[in-house]
């Protein structure tokens, strides 16, 4: 009986501390004027995306078909100057306009949402390629936030019985992004979801299929490139139903014959974001492979 009371007592204390922490975070971020009000007012997610969330467009003076980049902070170029990013280097080397719609801390959801809601620049007429820089962690981001400091929110898609994506919620409620939720959410992912290859494969394929379908509606002649970043063995997904002349899957390590997740190509020993040298070593092989 004493053990039972001890367990119940500790669980109660834990629950009270949990609620207290959530309340502190809630009121702290409201006080700082964060975008929590967007969630309360239910402002559509598309109205919260701002132009300065993205890298500037490079090469607008060029007349060749443009390139659009999608992805997360890797494709965005976190910690890099504009001139060190993939977008700038591609534009300079190929004499093409390059539009970078990668968002820091994001992934599939945001890329699809941006395409579906026609957030693309009106000057984009007939792009040569959409290039999605695929980091394996994007799969986890389908189910949870990418990091504890990510309070921007993102749209939420789900699969229907025909494995087709539909927009379940235009935004995440604020409480889903507090530290404690992040902590437990990722424990659940590691224990149960990460190993469910079949489920994750359905989601990955559904996102890429949906993106490609939306792109083809507006740009019928544009090709979609999935550029998996780092060790190819991490990407245990079957793209056989999607791959054709207009849907191409490439891997950075295979193209460059280098291991881009090694320290040599990282911002630092503790941060795996690509440094400028990583994009330099992939640039020419990518241009050659895509005939740019």
Image: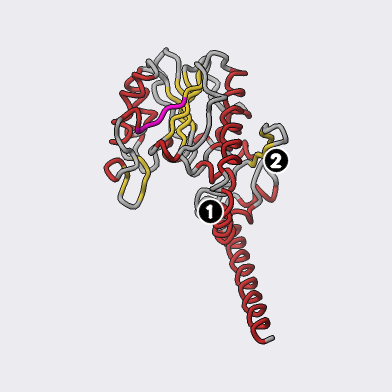
Lateral position of residue 90 relative to residue 1, left or right: left
Residue situated in front as seen by the camera: 171 or 51: 171
In the picture, residue 46 is in which quadrant? top right
Q: Is residue 182 magenta?
A: no
The residue singled out by tag 1 in the image is 190
State left or right for residue 247 relative to residue 6: left
The residue at 53%/46% (across/down) is 140
Q: How many marks?
A: 2
Q: Secondary structure at mark 1?
A: helix
User: Which sits earlier in the primary sequence, circle 1 or circle 2?
Assistant: 2
Q: Is residue 257 above or below residue 200?
A: above
Say which residue appears at 65% left-offset and 51% top-offset. 37
Determine the image quadrant of residue 207: top right
Residue 246 at x, y = what percent? 51, 18
Is 51 in front, or is 158?
158
Q: Position of residue 164 (x, y in %)?
A: 67, 32
Crowding at dot 2, Cα within 10 Å, few <14 / some 14-19 / many 20+, comes out as few
Report, in whole angstroms, how far the alpha carbon at label 1 lies from the one at label 2.
23 Å
- Residue at 66%, 34% (x, y): give it: 165
Above or below, 130 relative to 15? above
Give the residue at x 36% y 17%. Answer: 95
Foreground disc of the pair 1, 2: 1
The range drawn in magenta is 249-253
Q: Quadrant of residue 183?
A: bottom right
The picture places residue 66, in percent across and down from the top left corner, at 45, 19
Residue 226 shows which numbered tag?
none
User: Which residue is label 2 attached to?
Assistant: 168
Per the image, label 2 sits on a secondary structure element best described as strand
Q: How is the image coloured?
A: secondary structure
Q: Where's the N terminus, which quadrant?
A: bottom right
């Amino acid at each position: 009986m004493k053990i039972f009371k001890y367990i119940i007592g500790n669980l109660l204390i834990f629950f009270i501390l949990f609620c207290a922490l959530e309340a502190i975070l809630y009121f702290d971020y409201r006080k700082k004027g964060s975008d929590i009000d967007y969630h309360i007012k239910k402002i559509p997610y598309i109205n919260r995306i701002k132009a300065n969330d993205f890298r500037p467009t490079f090469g607008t003076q060029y007349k060749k078909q443009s390139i659009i980049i999608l992805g997360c902070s890797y494709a965005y170029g976190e910690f890099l100057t504009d001139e060190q990013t993939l977008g700038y280097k591609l534009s300079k080397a190929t004499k093409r306009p390059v539009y970078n719609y990668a968002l820091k801390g994001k992934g599939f959801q945001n890329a699809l949402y941006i395409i579906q809601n026609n957030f693309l620049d009106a000057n984009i007429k007939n792009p040569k390629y959409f290039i999605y820089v695929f980091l394996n962690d994007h799969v986890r981001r389908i189910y949870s936030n990418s990091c504890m400091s990510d309070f921007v929110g993102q749209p939420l898609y789900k699969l229907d019985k025909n494995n087709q994506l539909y927009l379940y919620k235009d935004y995440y409620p604020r409480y889903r992004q507090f530290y404690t939720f992040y902590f437990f959410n990722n424990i659940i992912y590691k224990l149960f979801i990460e190993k469910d290859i079949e489920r994750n494969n359905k989601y990955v394929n559904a996102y890429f299929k949906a993106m490609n379908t939306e792109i083809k509606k507006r740009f019928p002649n544009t090709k979609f490139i999935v550029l998996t970043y780092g060790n190819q063995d991490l990407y245990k997904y079957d793209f056989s139903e999607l791959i054709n002349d207009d849907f191409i899957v490439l891997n950075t390590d295979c193209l460059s014959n280098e291991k881009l997740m090694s320290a040599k190509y990282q911002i630092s020993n503790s941060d795996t974001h690509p440094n400028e040298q990583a994009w330099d070593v992939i640039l020419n092989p990518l241009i050659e492979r895509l005939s740019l």
